[in-house]
Image (tube, rainbow, N blue to C red):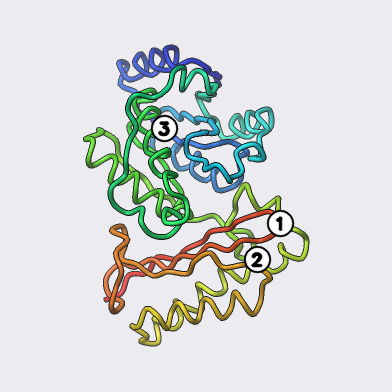
Amino acid sequence: MKVVTTIKEMQEEIALQKKCGQTVGYVPTMGYLHEGHLTLLKQAGKENDLVVLSIFVNPIQFGPEEDLASYPRDFERDRALAESEHVDYIFYPSVDEMYPNKLTVRAIVQERTEVLCGKLRPGHFDGVATVITKLFNIVMPTRAYFGRKDAQQAAVIEGLIADFNFPITLVVVDTVRETDGLARSSRNVNLLPEERRQAPALYKSLKAAKSLIEQGEKNPPRIVEEVTRIIQTETSGKIDYVEVYSYPELKPLNFLAGRIIIALAVKFTHARLIDNLMIEID
């Protein structure tokens, strides 16, 4: 495994490998790897000749009140985990390497961002789209791997790939969960002990909503009501949102049909958790 810290070297390495006919699977991350990331790396390894992992905490996707400084970082731990998954390259640039000068052009995401986390974090997905555009041009992957837990991000990236004609296949991998159902996240370590015991109620609420739908419920407000009830009853967290939309369009629904997403975000003392469930309705 090779650690690369400059854009020029990363582009040269990948260009050489692709010239030899190698396919490249790419997993972009902000580090502090967990089982969800490792699942993406495993799938990338199965489907490609080479696997590239990037670790870059992207400052332009954090708002002024958000947790950039406290975002967990541990490169040596990440390096060991990457080696255990047979990653070929870690792209580990500095902020100065990625943004040596003030940006003259930024991506502005026009659709799929006015709801869910995008509604609460103005400019966040512009920062995501900007850095992913840069990373795609640096790594030049055959396939890019994202987790379904960040479903809005995956929807935005799907639009980015289509709109900018990247010759890249997007692969969205199912959410990895703890044995009690909690979606794995770098931020879970920030939960207080009692909050960690409560947190599985988030997934419980989504499963309860799915059960209602399977019983014939087609009314979106009824689904939101049930998810909200369980979270408020069983946790001390503050709900940011519970919403139901079409997917990947992320448009409101008068009644449930087609592919939908039930998504939630809940704030605890030192962590904000997100989760979702996608359902196909005939």
**Residue 177 at what x, y percent from top left?**
58, 58
- Taking the spot 46% from the left edge, 22% from the top edge, the residue there is 99
Judge left or right: residue 263 versus residue 85: left
Check disc 3: other Cα within 10 Å, few if <14, some if 14-19, many if 20+: many
User: Would you say the residues marked 2 and 1 are in contact, meaning their CB atoms lie under 8 Å apart?
Assistant: yes
| Image location (x, y in percent) of residue 142 | 32, 32
Distance between mark 2 and mark 1 Cα atoms: 9 Å
User: Residue tagged by mark 1?
Assistant: 191
Disc 3 is placed on an element classified as: helix
Q: Residue at x 64, y 50 (%)?
A: 187
Amino acid, disc 1: Leu
Front-lying residue, 272 or 168: 272
Q: Image point 72% across, 67% down: which residue?
A: 197
- Location of residue 130 with respect to 221 vertically, above or below: above
Q: Is residue 110 above or below residue 234?
A: above
Q: Quadrant of residue 47?
A: top left
Q: Quadrant of the N terminus?
A: top right
Q: Which badge, 2 or 1, comes first in the chain's sequence?
A: 1
Q: Which residue is mark 2?
A: 199
Snapshot quadrant of residue 70: top right
Q: Looking at the picture, does residue 62 appear above or below residue 253?
A: above
Residue at 43%, 27% in the rendered image: 50
